[in-house]
Amino acid sequence: MPGTDTGHTWLLVSSALVLLMTPGLALFYGGMTRSKSVLNMLMMCFATIALVSVVWVGYGYSLSFTGDAGGLGLVGTLDSAGLRGLVDNLPDGGVPELAFVAFQLMFAVITPALVAGAVADRARFGTWLLFVAVWVTVVYVPVAHWVFYFGDPTDPADGGWIADGLPAFDFAGGTAVHVNAGAAALALRWCWAGGWAGRGSGSSRTTCRWC
């Protein structure tokens, strides 16, 4: 793009590298499951890429990085739902926001994919997709707003409560990605397998019929 900072090229390369982590994770998790569950694990991870992409473009990015609803630093607004206004609003300099959208999408994808290992050999494919859609909407999107959204520096009421309120700087995604995914995996393992006294790690049975 003429007149655009070449830094956006490295941002897109970084996005592609993060995207490769999800297929790698699928192979890693697949190698730790029984042979009959490998395909299900692979599909869980690959379908997460497609599903989260739709959620992110539809409303996830807007709720994470567009304004601050109520000035509490908890969640954004729907002003950029469907990437409204971003496609035709390319800057003469600096990094295009669409490149930033793609970069943040990769983290939104890898986070629920990390959780998949907690339900290896236990989850049905359809149930997993439902969980991903709900979890990304209810958990990841608000947490991404808390941690990654640095609002207008001239407006103290604009910005995530962790990013601008504390303030805390999460350069490697340890809060929004790793802590978030770890807590979700722990909770999901407890609910899906009926607590620590539930099924052994090698069982494909679940204690809830809808799973």
Image (cartoon, rainbow, N blue to C red):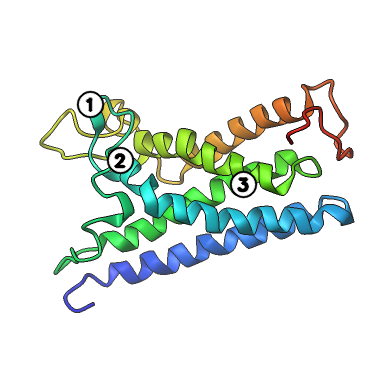
Mark 1–mark 3 contact, CB under 8 Å?
Answer: no
Q: Position of residue 6 (x, y in %)?
A: 27, 72
Q: In this orientation, which residue lies closer to the viewer: 131 or 89?
A: 131
**Vertical position of residue 49 compared to residue 169: above or below:** below
Mark 3–mark 2 contact, CB under 8 Å?
Answer: no
Residue 147 vs residue 153: left or right?
right
Residue shown at 35%/32% (left/top)? 168
Q: Position of residue 184 (x, y in %)?
A: 60, 32
Q: In this orientation, which residue lies closer to the viewer: 43 or 5?
A: 43
Of circles 1 and 3, the one toward us is 3
> Under tag 3, what secondary structure?
helix
Q: In this orientation, which residue lies closer to the viewer: 40 or 150?
A: 40
Of all residues shown, which one is farthest toward the bottom?
2
Q: Is residue 197 visible?
A: yes
Q: CA distance from mark 3 to mark 2?
A: 27 Å
- What amino acid is at disc 1? Gly
Residue shown at 48%/67% (left/top)? 16
First-in-chain label (1 vs 3): 1
First-in-chain label (2 vs 1): 1
Residue on which the image places disc 3: 129
Q: Quadrant location of the C terminus? A: top right
Residue on which the image places disc 1: 70
**Vertical position of residue 81 compared to residue 184: above or below:** below
- What amino acid is at disc 2? Tyr
Q: CA distance from mark 1 to mark 3?
A: 31 Å
